[in-house]
Image (cartoon, rainbow, N blue to C red):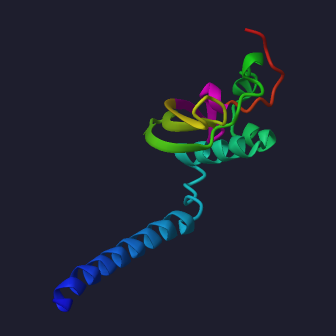
Amino acid sequence: MDGAAGKPDRILVVLLGVIGVLVAVALAVVFLRGDPKPLDENSPAGVVQRYSAAVIDGDTAAAGTYLTDEARDQCIEKFIGMPRPERVVLVDTNERQESATVTVSIVQSSDGGPFGPSEYESEDSFALVKSGGAWKIAAAPYTLLACTGTPVRP
């Protein structure tokens, strides 16, 4: 009888051990995956990746280097001071001869609210044009505007 009573305990211990190993592997994957691989800086997606990273880091000077002259002045006063996104994920790239559209998923979060922190995800697109042989952003989603120029009133 002692052997039969001990068998379920061993199965439970093995099961808990397997679950523990799976949790450890999942945590290792999440914490050790590092930064995303940089895309080709001469591609539309690479330009959007670098621009978005600069905006998230709050480096408007670096972000401004990826914009056309017209795009630098697209800021609208009501968007200045908006919280920066947490992450930007590439969804799709449609490249043409002299223009491109890069669609991204933008994740923003806030600390407020009656239930604690919340996260909001939206999909939007960048419009790019070739200027002097390089890709430049002609229009960015308003949540990713790098307000480097003088704000204009709507």
Q: Position of residue 143 (x, y in %)?
A: 63, 29
Q: Nearer the viewer, residue 58 or 43?
A: 58
- Report whether 25 appears left or right of 136: left
Q: Nearer the viewer, residue 135 or 148?
A: 148
Q: Nearer the viewer, residue 122 or 7?
A: 7
**Extreme-front residue of the structure:** 1
Note whether residue 20 is visible: yes
Q: In this picture, which residue range is highlighted in magenta? A: 125-144
The quarter of the displayed image where residue 11 is located: bottom left
- Report whether 43 appears left or right of 58: left
Q: Position of residue 152 (x, y in %)?
A: 79, 14
Q: Position of residue 41 (x, y in %)?
A: 60, 52
Instruction: State whether the magenta stretch is mostly helix, strand or loop.
Output: strand
Q: Residue sitting at 65 percent across and 33 percent down?
A: 144
Q: Position of residue 56 (x, y in %)?
A: 69, 43
- Relative to 88, say whether 124 is above or below: above
**Extreme-top residue of the structure:** 154
- Relative to 7, say whether 44 is above or below: above
